[in-house]
Image (cartoon, grey):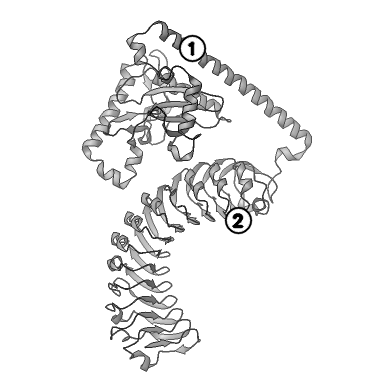
Amino acid sequence: MFLLLFSNKLSGSIPFEINNQTHLKRFDLSDNHFTGHLPENLCLGGFLERFIASDNHFIGSIPKSLRNCTSLIRVRLQGNQLSGNIGDNFGVYPHLVYMELSYNKFYGELSINWGQCQNLTSLKISNNDISGRISPNLGDASQLHLLDLSSNKLYGEIPKELGKLTFLIELNLGNNKFFGHVPYNFGMLSNLEGLNLSRNSLSGLIPELGNCKKLWMLDLSNNHLSKYIPLQIGNMHFLQYLDLSLNFLIGEIPQQLGDLKTLEFLNLSHNALSGSIPSNFDQMLSLRYIDLSYNQLEGPIPNIKAFREATVEAFRNNKGLCGNATGLKACPSTISHNSHVKKRNKVMKLILVFLGVFFLIFIIVGITICFRSRKMKIEIKPKEEEHQNMFVVWSFDGKMVYEKIIEATEDFDDKHIIGVGGHGIVYKAELSTGQVVAVKKLHPLSEDSVVNLKAFTSEIHSLTEIRHRNIIKLHGFCSHPRHLLLVYQFLEGGSLEKILNNDELALEFDWIKRVNVVKGVASALSYIHHDCSNPIIHRDISSKNVLLDSEYESHVSDFGTARIMSSDTSYWTSFAGTFGYTAPGMLFK
C-alpha cells in the first residue's frame, strides 16, 4: 500500500485516518505545508520501507514506532522543526540505505547504532543541535558513501576509524568544535570527491591527500592548521574548489598548485604565506574567484582574468603585490620603458656578481676535492678510508654521481620526497648499484642563496669532522650549477616527528624505544660538545631532525645551522633553529 501526497502544497494537520494506516510500504508527504506531529502508528505493521515527510512544518519528536521499524529502507525528514534526543529515537536498521534528518532541532549525542546499519550509504544530520563525540563505531558502517554532520556542536577529535570508510565520496564535518589533528588515514580515501572540515579548531599539519585523486572540493578553512601547504595538493587534477583560508600556514605558495588546471575557486587568505605568486599560475585559466588577502605576498600577480578582475579586497594587506588589478600599483617593470631598462640592468649586475661569487666558491670546492683525492691516492691510511665520501665510493666521478641521482629521483620528482626542511627538500634515491641514499636538495638559488650556501658549507664542515653511531653519515656532496646536493645514509624509520604525529606508529613506540632514542640523542650531543677537536653546537635539535633506523636507533641530522666553536672565542650570532626546541642558552649566543 502506498500513500503519495508530495508536492501538492497541502496544509494543516495529518488526517486521523492516515495516522492509523498500519500496512503502508511507502509514505510520502514531502514538500507540503503540513503542521503538527508526524503520524504515530505508521510502522506498527512492520511493512514501512520509505518514510518521506521532508520540507514541511512538523514539530515534536520522532514516532516511537520508528525505533524498531526494521523494514525501513529510506527515510527523509529534513527541513522540519522536529526535536527530541536523537540518541534515543533510532535503532538498528539492517535494510536502511538513506537517512536524512538535516535542518531540524534534534539534540543529544549520536547513537552508536548507526555503525551497525551495514547497508547505510547516506547519513545526513546537518544543521541540528547534536553534541558530544563521534563514536568510533561509525567507522563500521562500511557502505557509507556520504556522511554530513556539519553545523552542529560535535566536539573532540575526529575518529581515525572514519578513515576505514573506503567508499566515502563526500565527508562534511564543518562548523563544529572538533580539535586535534586531521586523521592521517584520510589520505587513503581514494574515492573521496568532497572534504569539508572547515570552521573547527583542528591543528597540526594539513594531511597528505595524495591518494585522493578524485577530490574536487577541499575546504579546511577557519582552523588552526600550520606549517606549509603540501606539495601533493598539486596532484589533485580534478580539484575545482580549494579553501585554506584563516589558518596559520607559512612559507611560499607551492608552484605545484599551478598544475590545478580545473581549479575555479582559490582562497588562501588570512595566513602568513610569503614570497611571490608562482609564475605558472598564468596557466590556471579556469579560475573564477581568488582571495590572497592578509598574507605577506609580494611581486606581480598573474596576468589572467581571475586576477585582473578581482576586487581590491582579494589582495588587501600583503607585503607588496603589484599588477593590472583594481587597487594595486603597476609593477615597476611596466611603469616606463626607461625604468624597465634600469631594472633589467640592475638585475643583470646582481646576477653577474652572484655568478662570480658562486664560481669562486665552486673553484674552492673543486680544488679542495682534488687535493683530498690526490692525498688519498698517494697515502692510503685507515683514517682516510674511514672518511671516504661519495666521490671516493664512486671513483671520484662527480658527473656520474650527479647523473645517477637525477636518474634515481626521476629529476627530483615529488613522489620521491621524504621530508621538507628549512633549507631544502629531502629525496629517497635508490641508485642503479642497489644502494639507497637520502639526498637533500637545497632550495633554488634566489635572494636567499647566501643563506643556502652557508647551510651547505656548514653541513659539510660539521659532518666531515664527525664519526659517531648516533649521528647521520654524510656520504658526500655535489656542487652543480643547477643544484646543491648533500648525500646521506638512508634511515628507513623516518623522523621522530613523523612517528609522534602518527597515532598507529606512536602506539608501537613504547617507553623502552623512547628511552633508547633519548639516550642516542644525548650520546650524540655529548660527543659533538666534548669529544670533537673543536666543539660543535647543533643549534636545531628537534623531533624532525632526529632520524631512526629500523631498530629505532636514533641519529641526529641537519647540521645546516651548526657552529664549530673555538675554545678561546666568544660567539654572538643571530638566532638559528626551531623555536620551542632550541636550548634557552643558545638564543643569545
Q: Quadrant of the N terminus?
A: bottom left
Q: Residue 59: where, in percent of width, then height?
A: 39, 81
Which numbered dot is residue 147? none
The reply to whether dot 1 and dot 2 touch (C-beta < 8 Å) is no
Disc 1 target residue: 370
Q: Secondary structure at mark 2?
A: strand
**Residue 52 placement, left or right of 552:** right
Q: Residue 403's spot in the image, x, y percent?
A: 50, 27
Say whether residue 456 is visible: no
The percent coordinates of residue 498 (x first, y second) are: 35, 40
Q: Mark 1 or 2, which is nearer the eye?
A: 1
Q: Amino acid at mark 2?
A: Tyr
Image: 246 above or below 147: above
- Vertical position of residue 386 compared to residue 409: above or below: above
Q: Nearer the viewer, residue 399 or 503?
A: 399
Q: Residues within 10 Å of mark 1 (few under 14, many from 20)?
A: few
Query: Residue under circle 2?
Result: 289
The image quarter containing residue 54 is: bottom left
Return the disc, 1 or 2, that comes first in the chain's sequence. Answer: 2
The residue sitting at the front extreme is: 432
Determine the residue located farthest toward the bottom in the rendered image: 17
Residue at x-position 42% and y-position 81% = 53
Q: Position of residue 516 (x, y in %)?
A: 24, 32
Q: Residues within 10 Å of mark 2 (few under 14, many from 20)?
A: some
Q: Which quarter of the figure is the C terminus placed in?
A: top left
Tell me which residue sits at (65%, 51%) in the image. Answer: 307
Camera-side residue of 224 and 431: 431
Say what amino acid the circle numbered 1 marks.
Cys
